[in-house]
Amino acid sequence: MLSHSRCLTRTLGRSLSALSQGSNVLGRRSVSGLTPGHRVAYMNGTSKCDARSTVFHIRYFRSSTAYRNEVITVNTPAFAESVTEGDVRWEKAVGDTVSEDEVVCEIETDKTSVQVPSPAAGVIEALLVPDGGKVEGGTPLFKLRKGAAAAKAPEPPRAAVAEAEAPAAVPPPPPPPPSAAAAPPAVGPIPSSMPPVPPIPGQAIDTKPVSAVKPTAAPVAHPEAVAKASRSEHRVKMNRMRLRIAQRLKEAQNTCAMLTTFNEVDMSNIQEMRKVHKDAFLKKHGIKLGFMSAFVKAAAHALLDQPAVNAVIDDTTKEIVYRDYVDISVAVATPKGLVVPVIRGVEGMNFADIERTINELGEKARKNELAVEDMDGGTFTISNGGVFGSLFGTPIINPPQSAILGMHGIFDRPVAVGGKVEIRPMMYVALTYDHRLIDGREAVTFLRKIKAVVEDPRVLLLDM
C-alpha cells in the first residue's frame, strides 16, 4: 500500500515537473492561454510505476468553433400604441452577409414603415416570416449567425487549373502578313482643275401635279401582334399604408356631411414680398422662403378667429371638442402613399419656424423616416395640389378633423382691378368642411380670412 502511494506521488510530481518545463508542449503555453476549445488528458502508459515507462500523454482536442459564431433570433420591434401589426418586406435573403445596423427588412404599418437593422455583423441563417407576411410586436423575424463570413466559392482542383493554364502558356502565333489585295491603294495626284459639268438633257423632265400623287397605305400590323402588345396586365398587392388611406377616406365620406366652398387669392403681393426678401431670409435663417409658410400662418390666424373650424365632434360622447391650440397637418405625397406630418403649435411660430419645420418633415418623409408620433394628432390639414399643376379640386377631410384647405396652382388670369382688366397671378383655394359642425357662415368667413392674410401679410401685424 505504501509502495503504491509512493508511485502515485512520483507520478504526480513528474506531471507537475513536466508542466513547469519549457521543453514540454504544455509548458510552452500558459495556463491562462488555454481556450475553451482545448482539453488536456492525462493518461498513464503502464499499470506499474516504472521510471522508464511513459508517465502521461498530453492530447489536444479542438472542439467546434460554433461557440464563437453565436446564432441569435431578431424579433419585431415594438410598435406605437395606435399600430398593432404590419407587413414584412425583406431587403436581404438567406446567406447574405450583413454589417451592424444594416437594414434587413422593412415593416409596413398603417401609417409608416419601420426599418429593422441587424444588431451585429454576420450572415442571415433563416427568415422566419415570408415576404409580405403579417407580424406583430415581438414576433421572431430572422436568425443571424454573428461573426460568420460569407461562404467562399470552392477552389478548382490543381489538375484543372494546370489544364486551364496550359493553353495560356503557349504564345499565340504571329499574324499573317497582309496580302497585296488588302493593301490600301496608292494616293494619286491631286487634280488641279474642276471636273466637267454634265450636259443638260434637251427634253424636259416629266412632272406630276401634287393632286395626281396618291398616298400609299401604311402597312397594317398583324392583329395577333397588336393584341399581345396592348392587352397585357399585371397585379400588384396594395401595401398596408395605401389600404389604410383608402379606408380612412371612405370613412370620411360615410361619416362627415362634406361641403366645399371656393375662393381665389391674388398672389401679387406675396410674390413681390418673396422676391424682395428671399435672399436676406436665406442668409439669416439658412432656408428658402416659400408660399407654404404664408398659408400655414394664415390658416392658424383664421382658425383662432373661427374656433368651430378647429373643433371636432366626439361621436362617442356626442360632444364638441374645441381646441385652444393649432396643430396643422401638411399633406406630403410619397411613393407609398399620402402622409400627413403635423406642425405643432403653429399659433406661436413665425415664417422661419414654419419653413424650417416643413423642410425637416419633408426630408424625413423622403427618407422614409417618419415615425407614428410625427403624424398623430393634427387639428387642421392643408393639401397643396398646386405643386403638381392642379387648377381646381375638392379635397377630402382627414378624419377625425373637421376641415381641410386645398391649395392649387398659380396661373396668370385676367381679373377686374379698380374697374380695369389686369393680368394677375391667381390661385384658387378650396375649403372642405363637415357641415354637421361648421355652418356656411363660419366656412366662408374662414376662407376670406385666409385670402386677406395671404394677399396682404400686414394684416397679421395689425391683428385684423
Image (cartoon, grey):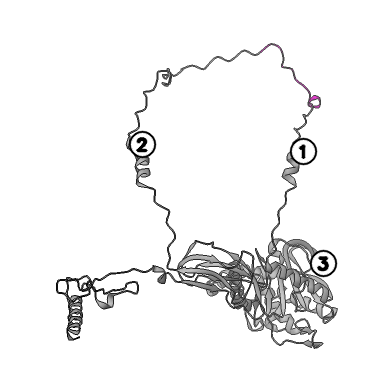
Q: Nearer the viewer, mark 3 or mark 2?
A: 2
Give x and y (percent) for residue 361. Answer: 60, 73
Main secondary structure of the magenta stretch: loop
Q: Amino acid at mark 3?
A: Gly
The segment highlighted magenta reads 201-213
Q: Quadrant of residue 296?
A: bottom right
The residue pinned by badge 3 equals 419
* Mark closest to the chain's N terminus, 3 or 2: 2
Quarter of the image for residue 269 reads bottom right
Q: Earlier in the sequence, mark 2 or mark 1?
A: 2
> Which residue type carries mark 1?
Pro
- Between marks 1 and 3 in the image, the one whose residue lies nearer the viewer: 1
Q: Residue at x 19, y 79 (%)?
A: 11
Q: Give the crowd class for mark 2: few <14, some 14-19, many >=20 residues within 10 Å.
A: few
Q: Which residue is mark 2?
A: 167
Q: Which numbered tag is attached to residue 223?
A: 1
Number of other residues with Cα within 10 Å of mark 3, as a class: few under 14, some 14 to 19, many 20 or more: few
**Residue 277 visible within the image:** no
Q: Secondary structure at mark 3?
A: loop
